[in-house]
């Protein structure tokens, strides 16, 4: 991961060119290069990079002139404040919707679920956020639109983050439930005379939860590292997504590197967590 | 329509002019066309037919497990005299499923839930139907595993299906079916997915259990050899209709219906030298557009105009034999014919 | 009597054979294609959602191509005296500026119409580039196997696991955003799905007995690819391409919204939403209509993709049919 970040920043253009004003003289260039350590051989630079990273040190942010790591850790919890409730909401809404839709294909709830998720797939998240602001903050003056604050400030961003994910997860739950309900072991379970509710909720759902888990993990990562950027920008929420955009605007590559690195770490952690959950659900799976 | 007024029937299971159809894009497939048979306590009936004859659909219909695109479109299925169809009947069916009547399905690989231990899966049945608690259910499960010949049942109880071979899984399905001491077990092609040596073991087990426990068995198979080992009586199905019923010995030695005769003839034998394998000409009919009259006529050597026009009724003969053919017993087949 | 019957039987048989031969002549690729198309159209008519999707897509393409003829105004034309006019159904609004104007007096409707062009251009370009690169890599990976396969799939897996937006941000941090960079970035983001799918098809086709036999006999890879693999690829590739198309329109809109995509003075729907953001409290139409355009387009494309998926898979069609005649209507996806 760190290699990707490192390589990308080095290879696409000379960062020094971007960072220095156009009129910089050759002497100033050399001095700046030396300051940033760019004049050392490439492998020394990388080695240095890794050793710093291992200690969590990315250097000082070019913009705020304090350790980048510090800045990242200030903003990280804000993002979690949005992502975690959004993911909980996603599961709470999507699983029942998907299951009921699978049980009664073609009926009202199924069509509703399908339509909802189709819409969720089709509308841009930033627009959804703005729409919610227009409806709830402007027209009806129910909820505050922007910035940090109490619980009521959380509602709109969390809903914006969660809604499309609910649509996607509900579809996966629905389609895997439909698949599982067609399997032979379900026929066996019914033949045993078990109440249908048990057949569905225990037998079929457990099997269906494997693909659902995959998608949930996926959504968690996307919410953390992708959609948070959009939602935080729309709502002026000071999380790391917001921070990432700001560091790009200010060409603060060091801060950006730090953000990307910590996000990558979180991605790995989430993946490991999902793998562990797999093993709990499905005894056939061996840990890779 | 109150079935309390009807005297309790002697038969355990009564299938009465059962009709099942499947609704597909290409048309309506008439899978089961008005069949009737009965099974009494302790009796074993073998339902024989090739793929597409409707035998598996019949078993699902009896259990009440027919789902879209299939539908029961006529007739009745009665258990101990009470109907299992219709809103009241379905509730009744749900009650007895797994308890008084159970089933062993064909494919042991996919018939078990891979995510639960077999102890849980077998234990579910007595826990639900007999109200046992976890401990009791576990004891019962160990008992059952022992009954079906699984070694080390105490350990095996906590293992998962994928840790067992096909033959052992089939034994477990049998154990599961016997959990509540049912009065009838439907075995749908119980040996088809297994290799020959295991087949023999499972059949022996079935025959043994049947004798010991006095359970009635509806054994469904395309394989005459399998049926011969376990069953007292046989019913032969073709294209959704039952064409012959009777005691196993009788049907095997003197088949009344040309199709049954053909099946027997085409069974390869080890004791008599055969120049070549004999089959039955032609192919099973399309159930969406079945032939007129007797469904077997396109493939039958004895077919005449009457066979093409009219469906033969089921006629009764001596010795509890029933045959639906205009030319019943016209062929003589059996050990003598081969000589 | 008997010979008579036999005679008619023989002539009947001869006629049947002749009829068959005639049909054989009529057959041939064009005929088959036409028949398939007619079948597809009939399917489409039955599935209103899919039809809607196709109409939307055709409509969008039409608008994109004929934008200069359809737009009532020049999208870049500024007129500060007409700044922030509301849509025509308001008192202050008028039909000349049907959907209102922005802060610089530019007509919203015209800008939306022209925005179609950029969105289409970017989406088509990305699907083309990512699709070709991904498919080729997938073919190589599936065919070579061994180390090449591990390496390529390794890259695919790592890239898929890492959230695309962040990767896009990293790249866009160092290069200046523009229409072309958006295409490059989204293509880099998108090639993996094609590679994975193609590789999957290659592997499964190669395992079929007749291809195994062909290879054993000495069929060259190129021949196997063209005769066996490509036909099996067209349908899933088409569906995937359409799905990706929808995803890319959304992604480009998001990037433009963040200021990292299409830059002014070019027009993009995402950019319009960003520009209208400051006026969310006063001029809601600046944000709503471009967003509607995006949603509508993407919805149409998704519906089309959904229909394509079902139409291409006979099993799915069967399921749908069974559900429909049993009294419960089939569902879309």
Image (cartoon, coloured by chain):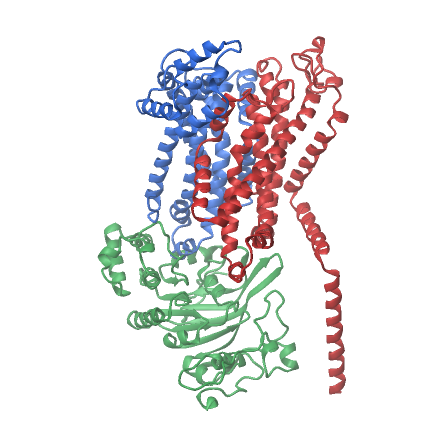
- The quadrant where residue B179 appears: bottom left
- The quadrant where residue A32 appears: top left
Chain in blue, by letter, is A
User: Which residue: 40% across, 74% down?
Assistant: B226
Residue A58: horizontal and vertical position, in percent? 36, 19
Residue A214: horizontal and vertical position, in percent? 42, 39
Left or right: residue B28 compared with residue A286: right
Chain in red, by letter, is C
User: Which residue: 56% across, 22% down?
Assistant: C177
Vertical arrangement, residue B185 with respect to residue C50, above or below: below
Colour chain B is painted in: green
Residue C109: horizontal and vertical position, in percent? 70, 22
Left or right: residue C171 compared with residue B126: right
Vertical arrangement, residue A15 with respect to residue B25, above or below: above
- The quadrant where residue A85 appears: top left
Q: How many tags in the picture?
A: 0
Residue A159 visible? The answer is: no
Left or right: residue C11 compared with residue A44: right
- Quadrant where the C terminus of chain A is found in the figure: top left
- Quadrant where the N terminus of chain A is found in the figure: top left
User: Which residue: 72% across, 18% down?
Assistant: C88
């Amino acid at each position: 991961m760190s290699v990707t970040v490192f390589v990308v920043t080095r290879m696409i253009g000379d960062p020094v060119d971007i960072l220095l004003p156009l009129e910089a003289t050759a002497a100033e260039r050399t001095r700046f290069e030396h300051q940033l350590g760019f004049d050392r051989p490439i492998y020394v630079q990388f080695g240095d990079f890794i050793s710093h990273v291992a200690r969590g040190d990315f250097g000082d942010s070019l913009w705020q002139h304090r350790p980048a790591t510090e800045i990242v850790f200030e903003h990280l919890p804000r993002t979690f404040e949005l992502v975690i409730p959004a993911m909980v909401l996603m599961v709470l809404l999507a699983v029942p919707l998907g299951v009921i839709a699978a049980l009664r294909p073609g009926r009202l709830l199924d069509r509703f679920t399908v339509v909802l998720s189709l819409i969720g797939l089709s509308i841009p998240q930033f627009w959804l956020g703005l729409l919610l602001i227009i409806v709830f903050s402007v027209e009806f003056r129910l909820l505050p639109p922007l910035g940090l604050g109490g619980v009521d400030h959380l509602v709109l961003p969390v809903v914006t983050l969660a809604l499309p994910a609910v649509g996607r997860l509900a579809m996966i739950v629905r389609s895997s439930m439909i698949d599982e309900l067609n399997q032979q072991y379900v026929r066996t379970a019914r033949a045993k005379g078990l109440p249908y509710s048990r057949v569905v909720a225990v037998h079929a759902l457990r099997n269906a939860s494997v693909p659902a888990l995959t998608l949930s993990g996926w959504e968690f990562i996307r919410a953390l590292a992708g959609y948070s950027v959009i939602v935080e920008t729309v709502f002026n929420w000071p999380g790391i997504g917001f921070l990432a955009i700001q560091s790009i605007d200010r060409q603060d590559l060091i801060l950006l590197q730090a953000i990307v690195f910590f996000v990558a770490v979180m991605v790995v952690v989430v993946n490991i967590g999902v793998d562990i959950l797999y093993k709990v659900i499905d005894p056939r799976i061996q840990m890779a | 329509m109150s079935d309390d007024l009807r005297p309790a029937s002697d038969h355990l299971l009564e299938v009465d002019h059962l009709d099942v159809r499947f609704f597909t894009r290409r048309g309506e497939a008439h899978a089961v066309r008005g069949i009737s048979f009965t099974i009494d306590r302790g009796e074993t009936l073998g339902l024989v037919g090739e793929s597409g004859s409707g035998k598996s659909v019949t078993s699902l219909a009896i259990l009440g497990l027919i789902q879209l695109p299939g539908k029961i479109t006529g007739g009745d299925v009665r258990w101990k005299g009470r109907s299992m169809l219709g809103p009241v009947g379905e509730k009744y069916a749900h009650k007895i499923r797994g308890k008084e009547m159970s089933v062993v399905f064909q494919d042991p690989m996919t018939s078990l839930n891979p995510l639960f231990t077999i102890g849980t899966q077998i234990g579910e049945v007595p826990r639900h139907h007999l109200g046992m608690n976890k401990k009791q259910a576990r004891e019962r499960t160990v008992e059952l595993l022992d009954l079906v010949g699984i070694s080390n049942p105490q350990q095996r109880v906590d293992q998962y299906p994928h840790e067992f071979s096909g033959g052992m899984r089939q034994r477990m399905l049998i154990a599961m079916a016997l959990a509540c001491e049912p009065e009838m077990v439907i075995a749908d092609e119980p040996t088809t997915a297994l290799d020959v040596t295991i087949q023999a073991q499972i059949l022996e087990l079935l025959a043994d259990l049947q004798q010991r426990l006095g359970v009635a068995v509806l054994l469904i198979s395309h394989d005459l050899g399998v049926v011969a080992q376990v069953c007292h009586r046989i019913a032969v199905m073709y294209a959704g209709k039952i064409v012959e019923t009777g005691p196993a010995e009788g049907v095997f030695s003197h088949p009344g219906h040309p199709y049954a005769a053909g099946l027997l003839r085409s069974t390869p034998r080890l004791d008599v030298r055969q120049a070549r394998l004999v089959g039955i000409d032609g192919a099973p009919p399309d159930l969406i557009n079945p032939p007129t009259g007797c469904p077997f006529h396109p493939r039958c050597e004895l077919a005449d105009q009457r066979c093409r026009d009219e469906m033969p009724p089921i006629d009764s003969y001596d010795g509890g034999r029933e045959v639906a053919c205009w030319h019943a017993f016209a062929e003589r087949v059996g050990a003598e014919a081969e000589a | 009597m008997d010979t008579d019957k036999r005679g008619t039987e023989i002539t009947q048989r001869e006629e049947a054979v002749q009829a068959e031969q005639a049909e054989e002549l009529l057959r041939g690729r064009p005929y088959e294609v036409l028949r398939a198309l007619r079948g597809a159209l009939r399917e489409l008519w039955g599935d209103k959602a899919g039809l809607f999707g196709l109409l939307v897509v055709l409509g969008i393409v039409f608008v994109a191509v004929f934008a200069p003829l359809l737009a009532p105004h020049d999208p870049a034309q500024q007129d500060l005296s007409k700044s922030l006019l509301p849509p025509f159904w308001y008192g202050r609004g008028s039909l000349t500026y049907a959907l209102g104007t922005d802060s610089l007096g530019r007509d919203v409707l015209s800008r939306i119409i022209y925005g179609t062009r950029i969105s289409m251009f970017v989406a088509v370009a990305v699907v083309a580039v990512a699709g070709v690169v991904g498919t080729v890599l997938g073919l190589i990976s599936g065919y070579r196997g061994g180390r090449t396969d591990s390496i390529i799939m390794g890259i695919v897996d790592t890239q898929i696991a890492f959230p695309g937006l962040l990767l896009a941000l990293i790249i866009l941090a160092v290069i200046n955003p523009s229409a072309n960079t958006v295409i490059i970035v989204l293509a880099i983001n998108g090639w993996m799905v094609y590679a994975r799918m193609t590789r999957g098809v290659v592997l499964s086709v190669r395992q079929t007995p007749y291809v195994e036999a062909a290879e054993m006999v000495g069929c060259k890879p190129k021949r196997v690819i063209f005769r066996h693999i490509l036909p099996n690829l067209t349908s899933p590739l088409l569906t995937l391409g359409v799905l990706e198309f929808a995803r890319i329109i959304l992604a480009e809109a998001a990037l433009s919204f963040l200021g990292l995509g299409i830059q002014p003075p070019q027009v993009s729907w995402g950019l319009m939403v960003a520009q209208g953001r400051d006026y969310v409290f006063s001029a809601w139409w600046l944000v709503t209509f471009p967003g509607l355009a995006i949603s509508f387009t993407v919805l149409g494309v998704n519906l089309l993709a959904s229909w394509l998926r079902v139409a291409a898979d006979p099993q799915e069609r069967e399921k749908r049919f069974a559900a429909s005649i049993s009294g419960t209507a089939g569902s879309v996806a």
